[in-house]
């Protein structure tokens, strides 16, 4: 584990690469300019889907390691800490986009929060596909790549259509592999909760906070999270806080007190109790154990 630094490299979308503001791009991971393939921990400000055709080793998302192998698809949501630990050269495609590319067109601010593989703290950020399915997905990626080579006035519509087809197909495969619900048109409140949690977890730590924002009761919110995610709303909130605490401990040089303050805990002792209840060790011990690996 590399020693933490104060700032993790954070990469933003290059909005004007194609002249008009196309908030989607695609490329080969082994040749795409500025694509990180070394072991430097980094984060993205956008969504990314990688299709691995060749390679071995692991790819870590928030310190969860995913084996690199042909047919593996890895999903990154904004803010997740990524780190390559490749043993042999990696080849494949990366497809990346900003939320505005889909949200505005579909007039649905929850669009990307309806898919199981993004912003999901309880399930894997990866999918392994059989060769026949992987080939179909690569064909769609290549269709997107061809559209970029011959951009026309209506290309944004074609690109959104291809991306939409890709996301629905991936969601069905992901749901089948992880035995989850593939329906993206479920209860509106549950997708709103996922988005609100990402936006407010730093300051809002109670189920009542989110129930108020959704104009429902805490009991109703808990019933929804149990149905769709198999756990309570409180557990999801605590899990998101714990995930961020681990990111800060592993990948920044912030003190435990600074992290507690950033996450709006009343004091460091309260943060220590919260972290120990979730991880079994204090934040300081967790950082020391991980750095020693």
Image (spheres, rainbow, N blue to C red):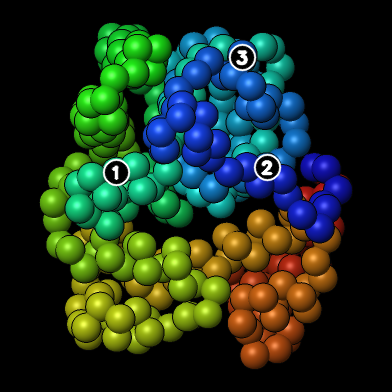
Of pointers 1 and 2, the one earlier in the residue sequence: 2
Q: Is residue 25 left or right of residue 80?
A: left
Where residue 144 sits, quadrant-wise, is: top left
Drawn side of residue 157 relative to residue 58, left or right:
left
Q: Residue at x 42, y 43 (%)?
A: 98
- The percent position of residue 204, horizontal first and vertical second, equals 47, 80
Query: Which SS class for mark 2?
Result: loop
What crowding class fits label 3: few (fewer than 14 Cα within 10 Å), some (14-19), or many (20 or more)? some
Callout 3–callout 2 Cβ contact below 8 Å: no
**Residue at 50% of width from left, 64% of height from top?**
240
253 vs 283, nearest the viewer: 253
The disc, 1 or 3, on the residue closer to the chain's N-terminal end is 3
The residue identified by callout 3 is: 30
* Vertical order, 76 against 31 (above or below): below
Please name which of the two marks, 1 or 3, marks the residue nearer to the observer: 1
SS category of the residue bearing label 1: helix
Q: Is residue 48 above or below residue 140?
A: below
Q: Nearer the viewer, residue 139 or 100?
A: 100
At 56% across and 12% down in the image, what residue appears?
Answer: 91
Task: Give the quadrant of the C terminus.
Answer: top right
Query: On the image, numbered disc 1 is attached to which residue?
Result: 102
Depicted 227 relative to depicted 39: above or below: below
User: Residue 275 got which mark?
Assistant: none
C-alpha separation, residue under disc 1 versus residue under disc 2 = 24 Å
Point 66% across, 47% down: residue: 10
N-terminal-most mark, 3 or 2 = 3
Is residue 219 toward the left or the right of residue 73 in the image? left
Q: Residues within 10 Å of mark 1 (few under 14, many from 20)?
A: many
Q: Which residue carries the number 2 mark?
A: 42
Query: Separation of disc 1 and disc 3 at Cα?
Result: 27 Å
Q: Is residue 21 visible?
A: yes
């Amino acid at each position: 584990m590399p020693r933490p630094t104060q700032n993790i490299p954070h990469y933003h979308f290059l909005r004007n690469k194609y002249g008009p503001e196309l908030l989607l791009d695609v490329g080969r991971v082994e040749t795409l300019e500025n694509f990180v393939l070394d072991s430097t921990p980094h984060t993205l400000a956008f969504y990314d889907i990688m299709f691995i055709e060749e390679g071995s080793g692991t790819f870590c998302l928030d310190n969860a390691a995913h084996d690199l192998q042909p047919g593996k698809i890895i999903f990154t949501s904004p803010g997740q800490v990524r780190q390559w630990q490749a043993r042999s050269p990696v080849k494949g495609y990366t497809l990346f986009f900003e939320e505005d590319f889909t949200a505005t067109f579909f007039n649905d601010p929850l669009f990307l929060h309806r898919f199981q593989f993004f912003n999901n703290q309880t399930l894997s950020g990866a999918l392994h596909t059989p060769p026949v399915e992987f080939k179909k997905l690569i064909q769609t990626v290549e269709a997107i790549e061809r559209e970029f080579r011959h951009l026309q006035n209506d290309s944004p519509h074609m690109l959104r259509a291809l991306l939409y087809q890709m996301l629905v197909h991936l969601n069905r495969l992901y749901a089948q592999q992880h035995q989850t619900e593939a329906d993206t048109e479920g209860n509106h409140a549950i997708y709103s909760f996922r988005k609100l949690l990402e936006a407010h977890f730093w300051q809002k730590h109670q189920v009542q906070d989110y129930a108020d924002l959704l104009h429902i009761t805490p009991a109703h919110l808990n019933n929804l999270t149990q149905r769709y995610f198999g756990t309570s709303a409180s557990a999801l909130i605590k899990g998101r806080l714990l995930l961020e605490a681990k990111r800060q401990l592993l990948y920044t040089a912030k003190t435990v007190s600074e992290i507690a303050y950033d996450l709006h805990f009343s004091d460091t002792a309260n943060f220590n109790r919260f972290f120990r209840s979730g991880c079994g060790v204090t934040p300081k011990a967790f950082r020391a154990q991980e750095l020693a690996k």
